[in-house]
Image (cartoon, rainbow, N blue to C red):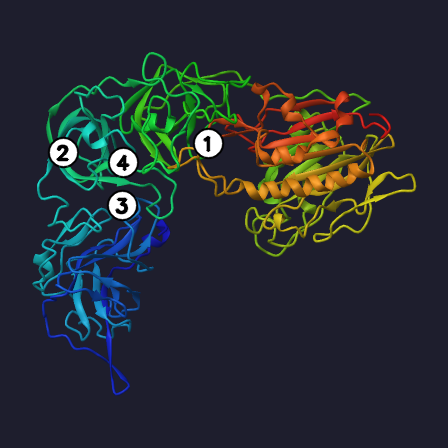
Amino acid sequence: MSAQNRSRRRLGALVVTSSLVVSGVAVIAAAPALAASSTVVITEVYGGGGNSGAPYTNDFIELTNNSSSPVDLTGWSVQYGSTAGTTWTNKINLTGSLAPGGVYLVQGAGGTNGQPLPTPDVTGSINMSASAGKVALVQSTDNLACGADCDTAAGVVDFVGYGSATNDSETSPAPGTSNTTSVTRKDPTKDLDNNATEFEAVNPSPKTLTSSPPDPDPVDAKIHDIQGAAHRSPLAGKLVANVTGVVTAKSGNGFWFQDTQPDDNPATSEGLFVFTSSAPTVAVGDAVTVKGTVAEFRPGGSGGTDNLTTTEITNPTVAVTGTAAVPAATIVGPGGRVPPSTVIDDDSTGDVETTGTFEPATDGLDFWESLEGMWLGINEPEVTGPTSSFRELSVVPKGSSLRTVRGGILLQKADSNPERVLLDDVLAPVPDAKTGDKLAGTVTGVLDYGFGNFKFLVTQTPTVIDGNVQREKTKPSSPLQVSVATFNVENLDPSDGDAKFDGLAQAVVKNLASPDILGLEEVQDNDGAVNSGTTGADLTLNTLAAAILKAGGPEYAWRQIDPVDGAEGGEPGGNIRVAFMYRTDKPVKFVDRAGGGSTTATTITTDRFGRPHLSSSPGRIDPANPAWAATRVPLAGEFTWHGQSLFVVVNHFSSKGGDDPLWGRIQPPVQSSAPKRHEQAQSVRTFVDQILAKDTGANVIVLGDLNDFDFSQTADILIGSGKTALISLPKTLAAPERYSYVFEGNSQILDQILMSRNLQPASQYDIVHMNAEFPDQISDHDPQVVDVIPLPSWVR
């Protein structure tokens, strides 16, 4: 749960109940006073879940069945009461059957700290005290009404009071607990009805019966034996002993150590994380011997996540045997372990943990896995993307593959750049840096994994060497040209304040040279994320227009159509949409034609000369098409330039949300969002075809945030084929210039401008790199602009 809620938590206790029906009347089955349970018992209670320093994100109660027969828990409950309380309204109802010797995990409320619990058998919102309380296992779902004397109440199967001040317990209360300890039954097979002597405060161990280790005979192992040449340990679930190494780094809930006598197999890592749950007592440079259980920790939990697991030792016993020199960092890059330059994984068919082969020499996913937990160094790493809001910084070793003109690394159809790795601030701060910078000297740290990426956890803040990359400015268009730009303004609304509006205005005036027509994406309504039912965006657009004037730019007018409230995706309440702005001091004119609406489709009409026009301008394209569900509907506008018609369509296609990550366990990654963008592209392509069917020489520009690459099927559908194929302007650029967005250090195209062929001879096109490469962004996208001369239809 949140820190705020956790700080207000009351002390408490927990109970479980079941009822019988006699002559139509429900009665509680009586339990003899202090009768030891011979069936299901409470074996562990933990109330610190999610708190500061907590090893697990959620509170939990663990049960086990000590009988020789299955026990159906349906109709039972666990109930909790505060340390001095007399009411029992905080409960979780149970379901399912518990096998003999089986463990049943009840998950309660949670917070943000710690790792997820093993898969629970039931979840609820019980919010227990981290230090003291009462828990009851009850053979009913009725709230207990026994006040402060429930340990012997009818229907109570087992009862645990913990903390010395708790007002009810079996004989005497168990010890008090903390954010990092639970009360755990010393012998889970016995119930002697004395909480004080039967329970101890120890590290939480959900679904692990502490008196019954996974293997009664520990396996002597080296770290490389535990890591193995695979994504999962061959010793997972085994108790290992005499695992030796030197401590290389430590965190708030564990430490990394490394074998000083590695094997000769580069596929097996020599580093490993030891999960201590609370702050470890070892120091960097300590020589240690570790005993514990090998586990595979999956960030985000076991249910449905695409994250790989990381191998660790849990429930450890650690002996410091002396001190030793920390091994020299294994260098990644020239002069050391050189990562693959092209392939992340090319031999798996689904889950890499169960399919494919392990090939660190050729597959980036396997290469970094072979270094998991190790003490690494990168000599003068080169920055390929800005420090993110999560304090992550993408770097590559020297000599990496196709670089952009400004020092990034280009995402290509057959090259996802597996040499990239993200520096992370778990152990030391990560500095602000931008694309094109370098980091001084040898940057060292340990390799971890989380949020779909391998993470290089630096132990000292690197020094940044400025690459002197500046924000670009485009050249103004000539008097004969009309300049048309696209700009994603990232959830713009009036609550963003003057700084954002002024920054965008400076970008329009200084960096984009005040284009004649501006297609905007992510314009929010007048109260932004407030879910008020408001859909108008006049205040948002007027504020931007005023800021442009203030910045020394021209007067802009705007056109847009309000969406249906809550129907087009984006930030809840924000009602993002696309819009046009255009200069009022230039020959560009907007052709206003009434009839447009949020659910009304604009169509193509012709005048008496057979020339095409929009039935409504501005008008929405195909809004009833299911392809646009929860997505911004494109906006078409009809303009004229010195009397020549120009049709512009501004788009914001569906995002890539829900796609498998490049570095996830599912390979090749499934792009589940792509089919919808293909449908959207076909909708817009059909509309363009309707214009060109009336006049193959019509001047058409399609632009916006397409949320897809220049080499994607989405782009191919929009381009079309034959005489009416559009020109993809990103494809006209040399590869090192072909990007408008940087994601996890990969420079890539998401924003695009396409245009009809008769505009090409007079066009000048520029992606203005002023946002995506910098940590201080006014938007996460780079705008782009094309200067064209709209020609009469008879000019081919």
- Whole-percent x, y for residue 759 in the image: 77, 26
> Which is nearer the N-term, disc 1 or disc 2?
2
Inspect this view and state whether residue 502 appears: no
> Which is nearer the N-term, disc 1 or disc 3?
3
The CA span between labels 4 and 2 is 20 Å
**Could you tell me the amino acid type at mark 2?**
Val
Tell me what residue is drawn at x 43 percent, y 35 percent. 668
The CA span between labels 1 and 3 is 26 Å
Secondary structure beneath disc 1?
loop
Which disc is residue 388 wearing?
A: 1
Foreground pick, 43 / 334? 334
The CA span between labels 4 and 1 is 30 Å
The CA span between labels 1 and 2 is 36 Å
The CA span between labels 2 and 3 is 22 Å
Label 1 close to label 2 by CB (< 8 Å): no
**Could you tell me the amino acid type at mark 3?**
Ala
Residue beneath disc 3? 54
